[in-house]
Amino acid sequence: MVEKTGDFSFSPIRKVAGKSETAVVTPNPFSDRISISTPNAEIETGVELFDTRGQLISTTTFANTGTLETADLPMGIYFVKIRMGQTIETRKLVKN
């Protein structure tokens, strides 16, 4: 904060707690498969893969780590929706 006199002071840095439910999707760009891992093995994870038109391409469920086979998909942009309990994450993926 800067005062009218030109004096200034710093605010303390605070850590803000957020949700740790973050899935890891690799590789991106992908070719013949996508691997997805989640931080909590006790929560069933549902995965849906969509094309750019919103057409559902593939679905699967797993506990901690799963794989989507994508060798037969054409090159392009896809979206993966990952449901972990009450948390939903969507990622944009590119197929080479």
Image (cartoon, rainbow, N blue to C red):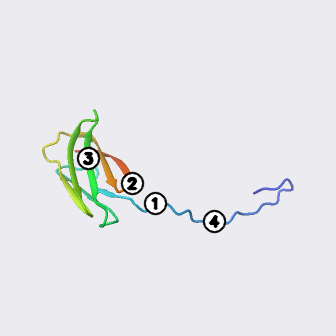
How crowded is the residue under tag 1: few (<14 C-alpha within 10 Å), some, or many (20+)? few
**How far apart are labels 1 and 4 at the CA level?**
19 Å
Residue at far top of view = 53
- Which three-letter amino acid code belongs to the residue tagged 1? Lys
Tag 3, which secondary structure?
strand
Foreground disc of the pair 1, 4: 1
Quick one: label 2 or label 4, which is nearer the N terminus?
Answer: 4
Image: 78 above or below 33:
above
**How far apart are labels 2 and 1 at the CA level?**
9 Å
Front-most of residues 6 and 86? 86
Tag 1, which secondary structure?
loop
Q: Are marks 1 and 4 in contact (CB under 8 Å)?
A: no
Quick one: label 1 or label 4, which is nearer the N terminus?
Answer: 4
How crowded is the residue under tag 2: few (<14 C-alpha within 10 Å), some, or many (20+)? few
**How far apart are labels 2 and 3 at the CA level?**
14 Å
Q: Are marks 2 and 1 in contact (CB under 8 Å)?
A: yes
Image quadrant in which you'd find residue 66: bottom left
Going 17% across and 39% down the picture, which residue do you hit? Answer: 74
Q: Which residue is mark 3?
A: 48
Q: Residue 36: percent from the left, percent from the top?
A: 27, 57
Quick one: label 3 or label 1, which is nearer the N terminus?
Answer: 1
Can you tell which mark lies on residue 55? none
Can you tell which mark lies on residue 19? 1
Quick one: label 2 or label 1, which is nearer the N terminus?
Answer: 1
Tag 4, which secondary structure?
loop
How crowded is the residue under tag 4: few (<14 C-alpha within 10 Å), some, or many (20+)? few
Foreground disc of the pair 3, 4: 3
**How far apart are labels 3 and 1 at the CA level?**
21 Å
Q: Are marks 2 and 3 in contact (CB under 8 Å)?
A: no
Q: Which residue is mark 4?
A: 13
**How far apart are labels 3 and 4 at the CA level?**
39 Å
Can you tell which mark lies on residue 87? 2
